[in-house]
Amino acid sequence: MPLTPTTAIWMDGEFVAWDDAKVHVLSHTMHYGSGAFEGIRAYKTSRGPAIFRLEEHIVRLFNSAKIFMIDIPFTVEELMEATSETVRRNDMAEGCYIRPLVYLGYGEMGLNPLPCPVNVAIAVWPWGAYLGEDGLNHGINLKISSWVRHNPNSMPTAAKGVGMYVNSSLAKIEAIKAGYDEAVLLAEDGQVSECTGENLFVVRNGVIYTPDSSGAGALEGITQDTVTTIAHDLGYEVRETTLVRTDLYTADEAFLTGTAAEVVPVRSVDDRIVGTGTPGPLTSAIQQHYFAAVRGELPQYEHWLTVV
Ligand code: PPE
């Protein structure tokens, strides 16, 4: 998806014009991949643009950095304020995607990241349906990847680490080249983990299941948590469990969740049509409530919004 530039990017406490937001080619993260990032969305609400679950995202950024022993030279409060300020400064009245990035900058080479300068940037841009409008409305086609999700002892799967996404990109390439929309990654033991940038849910006999975050190396998704809360509030049972690939083939419904992707129905997995091949009733109800929640239309979820 081509990027639509906005006006200013926050870099280490100052706003820099979009075209001038550059780093040196010898920045450490460019070579070795240590770094952490977040993906957040702001939505248009009746009270102006509001950032969805800002604090949870910034706290996860700090936890990711901690795992990599990167000391962020700002506080959680400072980065929350900087994020709000970036949305305000760029006039994102219609909402936007927000990308905070913690990276190791210029000045040191070699594998020891500890002496490196730590830089932080926050950029915003308008981003439509991540997996396409058609996918959002009618469902997407998934392929189980031949690439295996990280083992938690080779990569810290609880972290949203920059270099870790090479695994996701390889799986994405494979799926797209084979004519699918998105890949499902399995753990080494065959457990369903997640998609390249989304968590997975399946529905069977009215019960909703999602892989538990500890088992299969999936990121603990904030949208996964949002959707679990919404599903409970709608009276549905949600169980964290172990899933294998055939659970996806035979599910009544399946859907993906992520900040960028939002809530996306699954049409098929490895060419097996899921359910009727159209978004199922639970998927549709949850998707509808998710969009109402992020747009500030449901008072019970107001506490998740930070109006900028
Ligand atoms: N798993 C992975 C691997 C992942 O990257 C994401 C977010 C999720 C699950 C869902 O997490 P959450 O956003 O907290 O519900 N993926 C981000 C990156 C997208 C990108 O292309 O970059 C996102 O959705 O912002």
Image (tube, rainbow, N blue to C red):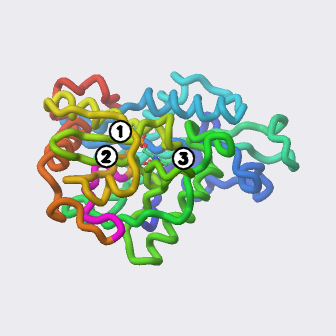
Distance of label 2 from label 1 (alpha carbons): 9 Å
Q: Amino acid at mark 3?
A: Ile
Front position in the image: 283 or 144: 144
Left/right of residue 28 with respect to residue 297 in the rendered view: right
- Looking at the image, is mark 2 or mark 1 nearer the viewer? 2
Q: Is residue 276 above or below residue 301?
A: below
Q: Position of residue 74 (x, y in %)?
A: 62, 26
Location of mark 3 (residue) = 9
Q: Position of residue 173 (x, y in %)?
A: 51, 70
Q: Which residue shows up at 30% across the image and 41% down it? A: 209
Q: Which residue is mark 2?
A: 201
Residue type of the residue flagged with mark 1: Gln
> Is ligand 1 closer than 8 angstroms to the Cβ of mark 2?
no
Q: Which residues are magenta?
A: 261-270
Instruction: Give the image quarter of residue 138.
Output: bottom left
Q: Is residue 174 left or right of residue 298?
A: right
